[in-house]
Amino acid sequence: MSSKESSEVWEMEIPSLEAKEVYVVMQNNYRISRNIRAQWFFKNLNKTLTFKWKTSQEECSEEIEIISAIPKLTDKFAVDPETNSSVIKIVSDTKIHFLSTQYRLTFCLDLSNSISTVDIQHDDILYEEIFLSLEQSLTSVSRPFIVPGSNYCFSPQIYITVIAHIPNCSSTVPQALIQGWILTPANVPTLLSYLRKKLEQMCKLVEKVSSVVSDEQIQFMMSHDATGAVLDSTIEGNKMIKKVLDLSADISTLKLIRYGILALQLLPENSSAGIVVITDGILNFPTCKSLDTILTQLRNSTISCSFIQLGSTFHSFSCFGRVPYKELMEFFATATCGAYFPSRKNLVESRLNSTEISSFHKALLLWSFQKTSTSCFLEAYEPSPTTENYWHVENPHFYTVAHQSRVKKKHTEGTWKVSLENLLSCRLREGYSVKSVLIDEAKNTQEIRLVLPWMLSTNIEYLITSGPIPGRHWKNNSSELSSCHFEIIVDGCYEFLHDVTCSDKKPIRSVYRKTVITQFWSYIKNLSNTDQILTQLHSFALNPMYYTIPESIKNGVPLFYFSTSSSVPILQST
């Protein structure tokens, strides 16, 4: 065969080796951070890898090991019968799914007063649906499944904690129903029986507390004549009603997640962590500072936050006007690489003894740093083909977040004298996800686009342009100082971008809008300071003057001296 014919055959075979999805298992003997996972991806990018097909965990010995792969063009990769192995190629759009041999999950049950309402679409009370949602999720997660594209039976060790949160009760009330339970298919019925009894006790406690709080609110309003103040629309009356009736954002929303973070810290380390909030969606939007603080805690600890919504979505006859905050739950799930289930009853359930991967497996056990804001919370949701007892009325005159026109604006750009490895590691720890990777073989450069869901309907994109290609020379061992060009792009609605760029021309009276603008500029400043410190740390070892002790100091010459006319120490000039 001539060289021309062999090159044509090679070009025809290469596309068939490209993988669409790759499933990777991580051992619990090591702490595998997001940086190590990203390094593994970029080191193997645009490379052909040979992996051996496995059927159980006992056959895995490496820190990070491929257990399955799904090709782009064919149904399955060709398998060598002698070695039981296949050759694949990881490209820029290959989706990497990381699985862990050990998990720790916290289920947070929202037992607020709003769950006692009636869902007329599903003909039940939301409180009854809490246990059904918990039962469905625990049963599905505990079941072993076959990794797609292989015969590998995945059965990890799962530690769970179940918390029933009552907003009106103080933190001294015990709200942990079970803590550190090792979940297996055999002990799920025993666990569910115990949780049902505990929830019945909680139901009586919620009834008692709600009646007491309601009576105290009525007495307080009558004693302070709050009703008349509302009718008169006085400032003092409005403040009084707000103090009585409104719950703070920390109580209604953030305490659920904070309790979940605390519960995860009491479970074994070196495991993938996740929080599952089962709620009716009646949540308050936190303040910008509180939201940024809780998201930073979740991202630094690599904790994914998922939501299972009780009841139905918004409709014209929602009980007492209680409308679930769907956008807030979607944002939390997107920002933390979690999942959002709009309704438990719309999920396609697998058979009891089925080994197929379920929606809960995909949402709670699979992790990927390539999840973006457009696909994160939709991947685990599979709508049911049947739509019985469901009706929905849309009002085209309402303006929702999904209908907002989005605008992209380049905020700033520059160059940092820092390696791509360090810069990418820092951004991934801050919660950025890999949106796209573009490689130019001719120029030997690469373009990595990262995205961070910063606020509701607002994303921050961080574009890094650098070389060489990571699949060939990931680490730069030379003494030359590498550089990366960056661009910060703000992707959001026109109103937000106008407030950020034109706040000096026209004063803004809204306190909330001022807070958002202040928080945005604070984040941009912190981002710049972080990159500057990273550059200084990266350049410290490359210049001997930074770490070489001068001869005068070695000989005992003091660095500072005191003058006879001043008590302030003076730096020695020579």
Image: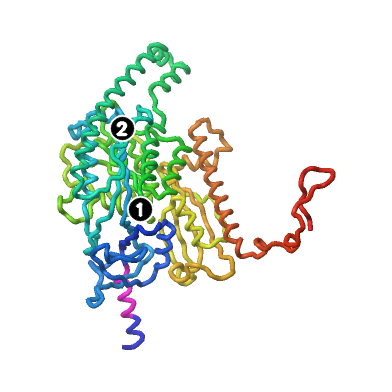
Q: Which residues are magenta?
A: 8-18
State the residue at coordinates (30%, 73%): 87
Instruction: Say which residue label 2 marks.
Output: 323
Q: Residue flagged by tag 1: what amino acid is it?
A: Ser
Quadrant of the image for the N terminus? Answer: bottom left
Is the residue 265 above or below the residue 197 in the image? below
For the residue carrying disc 2, how many other residues have a C-alpha within 10 Å: few (<14), some (14-19), or many (20+)?
some
User: Is residue 56 found inside the magenta-colored segment of the image?
Assistant: no
Name the main secondary structure of what is drawn in magenta: helix
The picture places residue 506, in percent across and down from the top left corner, at 56, 35
Q: Is residue 189 left or right of residue 476?
A: left
Is the residue 572 above or below the residue 439 in the image? above
Towards the viewer: 112 or 282: 112
State the residue at coordinates (21%, 38%): 194
The picture places residue 206, in percent across and down from the top left corner, at 28, 27
Q: Residue flagged by tag 2: what amino acid is it?
A: Val
Q: How many marks?
A: 2
Instruction: Say which residue label 1 marks.
Output: 271
The picture places residue 54, in percent across and down from the top left corner, at 25, 67
The furthest residue to the front = 556
In primary-sequence order, the first of circles 1 and 2 is: 1
